[in-house]
Amino acid sequence: MISKKIQVETMDELIKIFGPFDENIKCICTAFDVKVVVQDGQSSLMGEESNVDLAMRVVDKLKNFIYNGDNIDIGRVNYLCDCAKADKLEEIDQLLNDVVAITSRGKPIKSKTVGQKKYVDLMKKNTITFGVGPAGTGKTYLAVALAVNAFKAKQVEKIILTRPAVEAGEKLGFLPGDLQEKVNPYLRPLYDALQEMLGIETYSKMMERGTIEIAPLAYMRGRTLNNAYVILDEAQNTTKEQIKMFLTRLGEGSRMVITGDLTQVDLPRGHTSGLRHAIKILKDIEDIGIIKLSERDVVRHPLVQKIVKAYQSEDK
């Protein structure tokens, strides 16, 4: 058994490392089977030497994020612990200065995992990108961030967001209003991400001018989408015919991002997911990027990661 002191410059730094109600340090202690010892006002980690070394490496990475002005939350701590166990902690350094976008309130949006950074790099590089992974991996949010970046840089003239209006157990017919009002609940995550990036006022003006278009996938039929950043969300609920229709809408000066979670297909029994089929037949085509994010890229509460992992194990 050995102990190593947690070296900090200020008490505020220590408070950030420990987290609200000490949840960050508890996560580290549980992950590496170590414990915190406080003596003479100095905090130390105690346990088997190899475990303490790993735990201290995680603490050091947390300090790097704090010095960089990043927020530390339990999701990030959990991810760092996983990386330490897999001996991939050094890969984290590439995330420190990787600013994807700036929100309307001046908050920098950054990739929180190495998988997310690879996803962002693919979207920047390719005309068409497929981002596949479980809930909470930032697939839609990061795609919207890059779409707003492209619009602000005048690389595109329009942002188009769409998703199939497939029911996850509910019936559209029982919802009030016309078709647009009926599908609005399905498009809510897209509205929310855009409003955060642009601010309510700018978002509303762009919607009024038609610079932002949010519509069900069926509205894409027969169109050619030029000079636009087009995002198809929840693509696991498209049929082979629908996703083919969507991909062939691509026009000059446009980019497309297709996101989905193949573990949450709501299509009627017997229907093959168009997303699964598209990834299979398009994987070797140049200028089409495909990335499969995993439960390690989940940046919501650590319980979400555990839930995703449990369902994946059940499916297997």
Image (tube, helix red, strand yellow):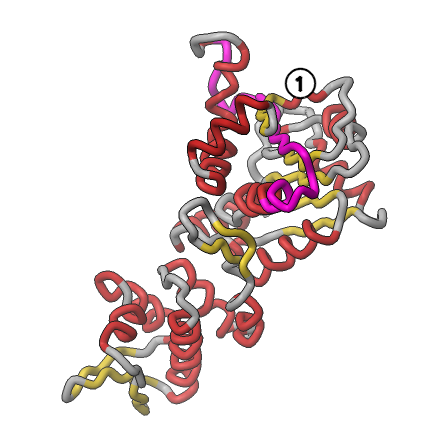
Say whether residue 248 is left or right of residue 82: right
Residue displayed at 16% across by 87% down? 39
**Over which residues does the magenta segment extend?**
149-173
Q: Quadrant of residue 269?
A: top right
What secondary structure is marked by label 1?
helix
Position of residue 290 relative to residue 12, above or below, is above
Residue displayed at 74% across by 19% down? 221
Which quarter shows the N terminus?
bottom left
Say what amino acid the circle numbered 1 marks: Tyr
Q: Is residue 118 magenta?
A: no
Q: Quadrant of residue 252?
A: top right
Q: Is residue 186 visible?
A: yes
Q: Is 111 or 227 nearer to us in this picture?
A: 227
Q: How many marks?
A: 1
Q: Is residue 158 magenta?
A: yes
Task: Quickly name the residue at label 1.
Answer: 219
Residue 280 in percent (x, y) is at: 78, 43
Residue displayed at 72% across by 40% down? 255
Say whether residue 52 is left or right of residue 235: left
Residue 78 in percent (x, y) is at: 41, 63
Residue 198 in percent (x, y) is at: 48, 39
